[in-house]
Image (tube, rainbow, N blue to C red):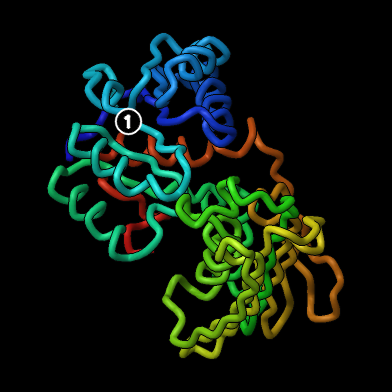
Amino acid sequence: MASHASPIRWGIVATGGIAAKFAEACSFIASHSGGSVLSAVSSRDAAKAAQFAEKWGIPKSYGSYDELFADSAIDAVYVATPHAFHAALSIAALKAGKHVLCEKPVSLGLKEFLPVIETAQRSGLFFMEAMWMKFNPSIRHALSWIQSGAIGTVKTVRADFFLDRPFDPAHRLYNPALGGGALLDVGIYPVTFAVMAAGREKPSKISSILSDAPTGVDLFCSQRLGWDSGVTADLSSSINLIGIEQTRSALVIGTKGAIVIPFFWMAKESILLDAEGAEVEVFRAPFDCNGYEYEIREVESCLSRGLTESPVQTWAD
């Protein structure tokens, strides 16, 4: 793929809360570095798209996703719909010649995921899952501690992500048709973090315990992962348990020390501890905007270098 000159002209697919976060971060970048600009937004509801466009100063709005995909003035799209629609919309955008940043998870399973990557490969276009945590400076710094041997050899990882959402069978978190459940919405963060801390290899052993809602989605999900290297991970996620610092943090334990990351999926600091639990170093990195700016900058960097996938969040990841 040839390199892409700045700015990237973005189109947003959907108008929910996560789309607003992206719009805020993209607007911040547009006003500071100019590497990205908001050019259009689309929704199945034209009025919602128009309202969103007015709020964020976006010049064009569309009442269908296909209209946005057909806009020749759009370079890349951000897919921000509920989970169940991610794969199909990513494929449609790629076929229309757009680079794609797709919210996590890209699909509800491997069967739906593979055609997305095959389409990206055939088109020669950029595609990335929007795992914003991976580009967070505090997470990157914690990984540098691991890689430098600051905590010795990694032995085990502990990570949890709980939120408490009242039961509503129509809400996307409780609706299996929309890809609801703890694992796909919040559990993806502990799993991703554990794989990162273990060296990006897939675990060789997985065991899990689930607690289901009346709709069939998982209210609570715990996993124990094991790697051939000897690293283990204990992870849990929930959509009906209180979300406080202690239920939204990550811990990496090594032979010489440990790393604690409060609110790890949106971390603003990482803490390095010695073998006695005393603080050795605290790395603090307040967001420039809201945290989504880092994944947008990754897309900018990759497109400027003519890459079709990110080396930080690869298709294999």
Mark yes or no: residue 283 visible.
no
The residue drawn where x is 25% and y is 44% is: 91
Q: Amino acid at mark 1?
A: Ala
Say which of 228 and 2 sits in front: 228
At x 61%, y 51%, the residue is 169
Query: Which residue is located at x 40 percent, y 26 percent?
Result: 44
When the figure is inspected, residue 182 is found, relative to residue 149, above or below; the finding is above
Whether residue 217 is visible here, answered yes or no, is yes
Most foreground residue, 302 or 282: 302
Q: Quadrant of residue 208?
A: bottom right
- Residue 264 point in image, percent of width and height: 68, 56
Q: Is residue 194 above or below residue 215?
A: below
Left or right for 191, reference 100: right
Question: Residue 54: x percent and y percent?
Answer: 53, 10
Residue at image point 46% right, 90% down: 228
Count of number-bearing discs: 1
> Label 1's element?
strand
Between 247 and 181, the one lying in front of the other is: 181
Residue at label 1? 76
Q: Label 1 crowding class (10 Å Cα cut-off): few <14, some 14-19, many 20+? A: many
Q: Position of residue 263 (x, y in %)?
A: 73, 54
Closer-to-camera residue (145/53): 53
Q: Which quarter of the rendering shows the C terminus?
A: bottom left
Horizontally, is 30 left or right of 300 in the view? right
